[in-house]
């Protein structure tokens, strides 16, 4: 069953801070995106293998179980996953993480994140 949110695509948000996760999820849902969430890097990778590929991934770097760096490394090793755009949102940035199409430092402005998502999400 298709819904109006399917028209903009699916965004996977991988974030362990539940307050941030819920805020991003709610904002993206209001914008018409379907949103899937994961609270650690391994859960995020499991979702990539289990479900249809998302249009874009919003990824924190400091995550439990498997870090965002490990998540990106696993994506780079997979021909099926390497093409999915990743926007990194983290307090731990000094340089753009390898494999990310864009990045922003926490705290961030939701409108700026939304702009990056619009720019980089696959149709």
Image: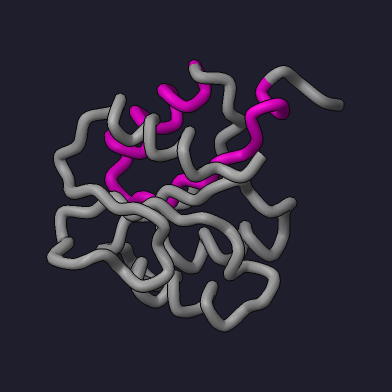
- Where does the image place residue 109, in percent across and percent down from the top left? 22, 30
Magenta includes 25? yes
- Where does the image place residue 71, in percent across and percent down from the top left? 44, 71
Which quadrant holds residue 59?
bottom left
In depth, the one of 84 and 52 nearer the eye is: 84
Residue placed at 17% from the left, 62% from the top?
Answer: 93
Residue placed at 28% from the left, 34% from the top?
Answer: 19
Magenta includes 75? no
Quadrant of the image containing the N terminus = top right
- Number of numbered callouts drawn: 0
Which quadrant holds residue 123?
top right
Residue placed at 45% from the left, 56% from the top?
Answer: 86
- Where does the image place residue 38, in percent across and percent down from the top left? 48, 51
Q: Main secondary structure of the magenta part?
A: helix
| Residue at the extreme bottom of the image, as rendered | 77
| Residue at the extreme right of the image, as rendered | 1
Which quadrant holds residue 91?
bottom left
- Where does the image place residue 121, in percent across and percent down from the top left? 55, 42
Q: Is residue 84 left or right of residue 26?
A: right
In depth, the one of 18 and 109 nearer the eye is: 109
Q: Is residue 81 left or right of residue 75?
A: right
Q: Is residue 7 left or right of residue 87?
A: right
Residue 39, can we see it?
no
The magenta region covers: 5-30
Residue placed at 35% from the left, 53% from the top?
Answer: 102
């Amino acid at each position: 069953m298709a819904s109006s949110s399917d028209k903009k695509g699916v965004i996977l948000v991988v974030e362990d801070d539940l307050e941030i996760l819920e805020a991003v999820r709610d904002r993206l849902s209001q914008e018409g995106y379907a949103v899937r969430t994961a609270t650690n890097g391994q859960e995020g990778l499991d979702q990539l293998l289990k479900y249809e590929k998302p249009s874009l991934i919003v990824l924190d770097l400091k995550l439990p179980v498997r870090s965002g760096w490990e998540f990106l490394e696993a994506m780079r090793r997979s021909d099926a996953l390497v093409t999915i755009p990743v926007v990194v949102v983290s307090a731990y940035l000094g340089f753009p993480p390898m494999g990310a199409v864009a990045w922003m430092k926490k705290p961030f402005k939701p409108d700026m994140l939304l702009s990056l998502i619009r720019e980089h999400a696959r149709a």
